Image (spheres, rainbow, N blue to C red):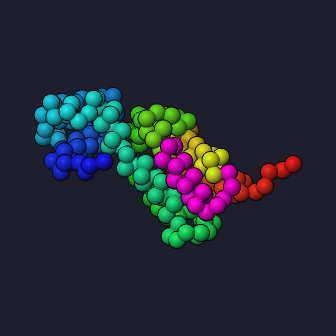
């Protein structure tokens, strides 16, 4: 894959920033392409050169949240074979704090239960990272555990953003971390006869 042209990258970055700024004031459904391009200082044709519609731009603008979530869950892994800490990594609460700041936009793309375009992308990337790490470590049931961890995290994050799961970012991190560790440990035990 060839690197993106710097001008294209700058234009897309301006459009992403513009959309996030617009969504800070109102829900995505109330944002118009006109408002986004006006704030970004680009023409409407330029917008459509890069994106088919606002939801496509929104998913692109939220791609960083996916990478941040994956990194936050794996922040403790500073070396291969490191053991997971008992307490959640600080990066997890930091990620949840940032997610709460953009909750109205994320709720549009990450539906309750973990569906929607952002939920699908988050699940896919979390599953791939967890599977790769379990496989590299020689841990059993890499596919099963990776799917369980990705589904649990994505679903709980979505339900928290939609208000079905209570708690502050730090409280949620404190409850979520042991659950994710339990899924990892359950997948490491031999199956009962």
Our reading of the magenta stretch's main secondary structure is helix
- What number of labels is visible? 0
Q: Residue at x 47, y 62 (%)?
A: 91
Residue lying at the far right in this picture: please name it. 193
Q: Position of residue 82 (x, y in %)?
A: 58, 70
Q: Residue at x 17, y 40 (%)?
A: 39
Q: Position of residue 128 (x, y in %)?
A: 52, 49
Can residue 62 be found in the magenta stretch? no
- In the displayed structure, 75 sits above or below 193; it is below
Of 192 and 32, the residue lying toward us: 192
- In the displayed structure, 5 sits above or below 79; it is above
Q: Quadrant of the rendered structure where residue 25 is? A: top left
- Indicate left or right for 141 with 72 as reference: right
Q: Does the rendering let one see residue 49? A: yes
- In the displayed structure, 22 sits above or below 65; it is above
- Indicate left or right for 188 with 157 as reference: right
Q: Does the rendering let one see residue 101? A: no
Of 135 and 168, the residue lying toward us: 135
Q: Quadrant of the rendered structure where residue 159 is? A: top right
| Span shown in magenta | 123-141
Q: Residue at x 42, y 54 (%)?
A: 68
Q: Position of residue 145 (x, y in %)?
A: 64, 50
- In the displayed structure, 21 sits above or below 28; it is below
- Indicate left or right for 90 with 147 as reference: left
Q: Residue at x 19, y 48 (%)?
A: 5
Q: Quadrant of the rendered structure where residue 139 is? A: bottom right
Can residue 134 be found in the magenta stretch? yes
Q: Position of residue 123 (x, y in %)?
A: 51, 43
């Amino acid at each position: 894959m060839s690197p993106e042209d710097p001008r294209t990258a700058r234009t897309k970055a301006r459009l992403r920033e513009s959309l996030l700024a617009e969504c800070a004031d109102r829900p995505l459904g109330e944002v118009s392409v006109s408002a986004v391009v006006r704030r970004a200082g680009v023409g409407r044709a330029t917008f459509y050169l890069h994106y088919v519609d606002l939801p496509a731009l929104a998913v692109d603008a939220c791609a960083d949240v996916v990478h941040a979530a994956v990194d936050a869950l794996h922040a403790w892994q500073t070396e291969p074979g490191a053991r997971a800490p008992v307490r959640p990594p600080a990066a997890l609460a930091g990620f949840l704090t940032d997610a709460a700041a953009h909750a109205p936009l994320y709720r549009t793309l990450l539906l309750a239960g973990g569906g929607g375009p952002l939920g699908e992308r988050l699940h896919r990337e979390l599953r791939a990272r967890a599977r790769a790490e379990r496989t590299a470590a020689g841990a059993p049931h890499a596919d099963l555990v990776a799917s369980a961890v990705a589904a649990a995290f994505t679903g709980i994050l979505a339900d928290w953003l939609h208000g079905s799961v209570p708690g502050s970012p730090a409280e949620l991190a404190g409850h979520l971390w042991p659950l994710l560790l339990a899924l990892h440990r359950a997948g490491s035990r031999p199956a009962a006869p």
